[in-house]
Image: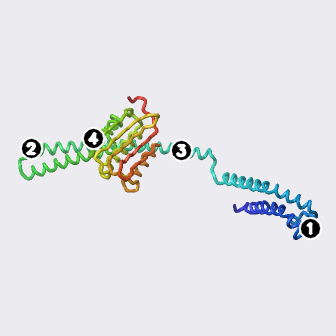
Amino acid sequence: MTVLWPVDLLAVLLGVTVPAALLATPVLFGTLGDGEQVNVVKAVPVTSWPQALLTCVAGVIAVPACAYGIGLLAGARAALARVILAPPEDRLDQRVVELARSRVRLVDAFEAERSRIERDLHDGAQQRLVALSMMLGLARLDTPAGPLADQLSRAHDEAGLALVELRELIRGIHPPLLTDFGLEAAVTDLATRSAVRVDVGFTATARFPRPVESTVYFVVAEALANLAKHSGADRGEIIGAYAGGVLTVEVTDNGHGGADIGAGTGLIGLADRVSVVGGRLSLSSPAGGPTRLVVEIPCQALPDSA
């Protein structure tokens, strides 16, 4: 734009003024030239009416020719801009492939770290809490009634509560049920523990890659939490199916609807979590209900799954 603007200006001026001057030759010949002579574009003399009319005809032909030339120049400038500004297509393809690979590596690393934390808590802190709870229980039995026995009793109860909370934490990090028995069993367990009655119709009994199963599990868990806290529903349903290489999970309820992505219910986080594994999340929640959340993830079932 900085270097070639004089060329553009010249092309536009010639493309507009030359056809206009040719078309106006008969008028100029009869007025300014008094029917004797007029110079077209200050260069070509016209000394008779036949010449003036022929020049006008040339102007009619010049209009589309100049317009086409300006169009060619614009196309050339656009092609030049693409060459200068846009990276080569193969480089874009390489970037897309690298981004896809890096996303897969991040997902795998995240799932591996999640599993490691769950295993460390299960085999380390949980076992120590179990041992502590047993020691406190035995000490309470061996201690005569009195203030010390009461303190040991309270300590034993607190250890039990801490153990329950740790187990819930482990289940939230990476549920063992999901790892051992798959998505159907884990989703059914979520529905069983929900504060609202939730029916399950999960026909996708196959096993899927760990990131896919983990994503679906936590999306369903968050959806059920929103159902219990915000929807006002007294009944929900979870439907899961796998067909055509796409795992589809749908969570619906009979609540008052009106779910809003920007209302702080974690829907944006759910959509981001689903997009990481190449899936799509859609939500339908008109005022008055019902609310319908659908997750679609393209994936392949594991070959050794039932």
Q: Quadrant of residue 57?
A: bottom right
If the image is split into quadrants, where does the N terminus sit? bottom right
Which element is circle 2 on? helix
Q: Amino acid at mark 1?
A: Gly
Q: Which mark is residue 24?
A: none
Give how far across and how far down residue 166 sits, in percent.
26, 46
Frontmost residue, 53 versus 129: 53
Asked if residue 176 can be seen in this view, the reply is no
Residue at mark 2:
142
Are dots 4 and 1 in contact, CB under 8 Å? no
| Mark 1 → mark 2, Cα distance in angstroms | 133 Å
Residue at mark 3:
98
Residue density around tag 1, few if under 14, some if 14–19, many if 20 or more, within 10 Å: some
Q: Nearer the viewer, mark 4 or mark 1?
A: 1
Q: Amino acid at mark 4?
A: Thr
Residue density around tag 3, few if under 14, some if 14–19, many if 20 or more, within 10 Å: few
Q: Amino acid at mark 3?
A: Glu
